[in-house]
């Protein structure tokens, strides 16, 4: 069956592209809830309801496994969905845990006790809603001890990227990085905790300097999916990919083509 990949808008395409590079034959249905993006400034109940509706839409496409390629929805909704809502035969996977496993040098699903890791100071860049959940710090604390996290809510950045205003987006990266460095002058690692941000990875790296290792999710999540499908081959299927949006399909196709720098074709969800 096809794997569903969901984001509030265009950002999850960075994850979908990494999945396509690792698993070129795997059928994928991508859904962008562009009509309701950005999620990062919405309250938790709204994010939960919108995420549930999107997952249900992907079930209609036959996707029993859905990757929530949105940190905001992963941080706010995934645990609650898994604990209280998800039917037995369906799976949702967030993008947060694979990233934290990479930062803390863990293998997929290694739930052993927290231990000391090399990295001691981590800068987190994410949407205001993701930062407010403190989900990153909580998940990190399950796996590592002695790591300081300084989080920067990057207000305005997703809006600028959805609007393809790269100049504004780059200016916002500069100012968010400067704000964080005033509070944590020498982080060893920086986590791009929003799937939109990998498009601006070079901009983050330049603003942070060469000594900071910048983690972004695409390749990390794609590798986790490869591992997952080896363990659960019933969720895998070869075939083509489709791109759906709750927004205006023509406008989203144009925006996605600019966002990725390659031709993209969306259909109405
Ligand atoms: N790409 C989403 C994320 O990873 C953006 C959230 C939003 O729509 O604000 O958090």
Image (cartoon, grey):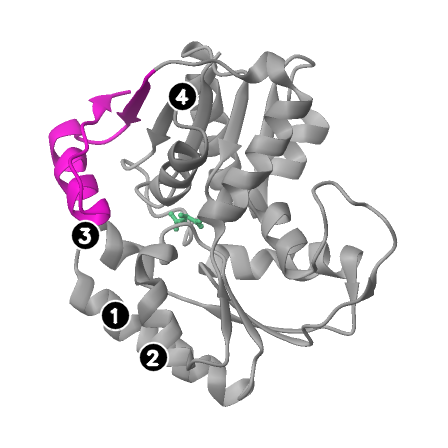
Q: CA distance from mark 4 to mark 3?
A: 31 Å
Q: Position of residue 200 (x, y in %)?
A: 31, 62
Where residue 175 is drawn, which disc sits there? 2
| Residue 211 shows in this picture | yes
Q: Position of residue 167 (x, y in %)?
A: 17, 68
Residue 186 image offset from top left, x and y in percent:
55, 86
Q: Which residues are magenta?
A: 240-269
For the C terminus, the image quarter is: top left
* Picture disc at residue 163: 3
Q: Secondary structure at mark 2?
A: helix
According to the image, label 4 marks what residue? 25
Label 1 neighbourhood size at 10 Å, few (<14), some (14-19), many (20+)? Answer: some
Is the residue marked by circle 3 packed among few (<14), some (14-19), or many (20+) residues within 10 Å? few
Q: Is residue 50 rendered to the left or right of residue 250? A: right
Q: Nearer the viewer, residue 185 or 138?
A: 185
Q: Is residue 102 above or below residue 169?
A: above
Residue plotted at (44% across, 32% down): 50
Q: Answer few, some or many: residues within 10 Å of disc 4's Cα (few below 14, many 20 plus, some between 14 and 19).
A: some
Q: Nearer the viewer, mark 4 or mark 1?
A: 4
Q: What label sits on residue 235 in the rendered view?
A: none
What residue does disc 1 label? Answer: 170
Cα gap from disc 3 to disc 1, whole angstroms: 13 Å
């Amino acid at each position: 069956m096809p794997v569903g990949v969901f984001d509030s808008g265009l950002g999850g395409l960075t994850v979908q592209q990494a999945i396509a590079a690792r698993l070129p034959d795997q059928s994928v249905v991508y859904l962008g809830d562009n009509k309701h993006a950005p999620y990062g400034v919405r309250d938790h109940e709204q994010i939960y309801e919108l995420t549930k509706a999107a997952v249900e839409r992907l079930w209609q496409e036959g996707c029993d496994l859905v990757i929530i390629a949105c940190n905001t929805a992963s941080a706010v909704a995934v645990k609650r969905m898994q604990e209280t809502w998800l039917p037995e035969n369906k799976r949702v996977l967030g993008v947060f845990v694979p990233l934290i496993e990479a930062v803390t040098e863990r293998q997929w699903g290694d739930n052993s006790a927290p231990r000391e890791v090399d990295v001691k100071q981590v800068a987190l860049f994410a949407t205001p809603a993701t930062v407010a959940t403190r989900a990153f710090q909580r998940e990190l604390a399950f796996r590592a001890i002695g790591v300081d996290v300084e989080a920067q809510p990057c207000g305005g950045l997703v809006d600028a990227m959805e609007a393809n205003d790269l100049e504004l987006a780059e200016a916002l990266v500069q100012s968010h990085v400067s704000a964080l460095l005033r509070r944590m002058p020498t982080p060893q690692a920086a986590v791009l905790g929003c799937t939109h941000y990998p498009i601006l990875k070079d901009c983050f790296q330049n603003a942070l300097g060469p000594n900071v290792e910048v983690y972004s999710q695409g390749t990390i999540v794609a590798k986790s999916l490869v591992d997952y499908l080896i363990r659960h081959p019933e969720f895998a299927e070869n075939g083509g990919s489709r791109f759906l949006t709750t927004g205006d399909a023509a406008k989203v196709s144009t925006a996605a083509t600019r966002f990725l720098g390659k031709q993209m074709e969306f259909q109405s969800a």
